Image: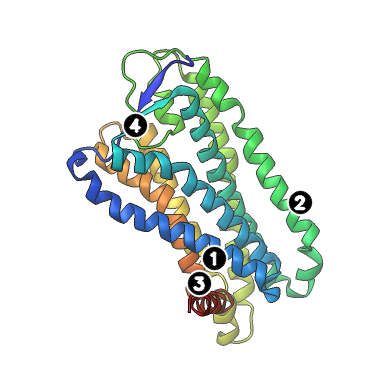
Amino acid sequence: VSSLAFLMMGIPGLEALHHWISIPFCALYFIALLGNCLILFIVKKTQSLHEPMYYFLSMLAVTDLGLVLCTLPTTLGIFWFNIRRIGFDACLTQMYFIHILSFIESSVLLAMAFDRFIAISHPLRYPSILTKATVIKIGLAIILRGMVSLLPIPFLLKRLTYCGKTELSHSFCFHPDIMNLACADIKVNVFYGMIILLSTVGMDLIFIVLSYILIIKTVISLATKEECLKALNTCVSHICAVLIFFIPMIGLSMIHRFGKNIPPLVKTLVAYTYLIIPPALNPIIYSIKCSHIREGWCLSLFCFTQHCI
């Protein structure tokens, strides 16, 4: 199995335009790398941002950077140099980290929803509930859950026999994609993949929705309309981050399991939307809605220009 190799796919039907298509992809990767690095820099250097909300935002930025770095080499390798071949072990490694980081991002978004719930529903108890030690414990629990839950996946794929077709559907390795290339019984893989997806990402989404139901219940009880709008305004960035992450992720999972007749181009575009758009948009969303981050961006830009001059 170790000598086995797969062929990755660029954008089906548009292979002749890969060099031109790489331009917007490079722009998105650059925005994602620059934006998330700046978020981390601003939070670290700004003392007033050393709060649970921004610690969780930093976790989100690190996760997004990881996702970008996982897919960037193979995606641009195909667009620029038509390097489609990837070894079996390298493919499993990429797949493992893509799925771990996706699960971690889901959990971080849940932690951010919990942060907003405590801040709005129990503002006086917020500092005592979400201490620095608690945030660290939440972060470690998130990483551990992702690593342990996905650990069996590479071993379940290694036990399968692969023959005939070796062409993947994307420019990266995705569990259902690899699994469907096996010429063996994959019922165990399908069952385990579904259970893990529902018990992690599925549960995270349910608890995020529940958090917002409780937040809305608290907001409705507030005395004035201004207080309601002020409380809800602190959640806008998070809601946008949840939507741009979960909608493509659910769409891609459904396509791989039930969309056999869906055109390959649609499957490819949904996959890119799922893995590239959130890391690129999250820093922009939080910069627009958060005055502290926006001020940090301006200060960083000013320092950079002064240094250049």
Image vertical order of residue 146 relative to residue 127, above or below: above
The residue at 32%/38% (across/down) is 78
Q: Earlier in the sequence, mark 2 or mark 4?
A: 4
The residue at 35%/36% (across/down) is 170
Q: Earlier in the sequence, mark 4 or mark 3?
A: 4
Nearer mark to the viewer, of 2 and 1: 1
From the viewer's side, name the closer residue of 193 and 271.
271
Q: Are marks 2 and 4 in contact (CB under 8 Å)?
A: no
Nearer mark to the viewer, of 3 and 2: 3
Q: Which residue is mark 1?
A: 38
Q: Earlier in the sequence, mark 1 or mark 4?
A: 4
Q: Which residue is mark 2?
A: 137
Residue 73 in sight from this viewpoint: yes
Cα distance in 3D space between marks 4 and 3: 35 Å
**Type of the residue with mark 2:** Lys
Residue 109 in sight from this viewpoint: no
Q: Which residue is mark 4?
A: 8
The disc at residue 200 is none
Q: Position of residue 278 (x, y in %)?
A: 45, 56
Q: Which residue is mark 3?
A: 287
From the viewer's side, name the closer residue of 195 and 214.
195
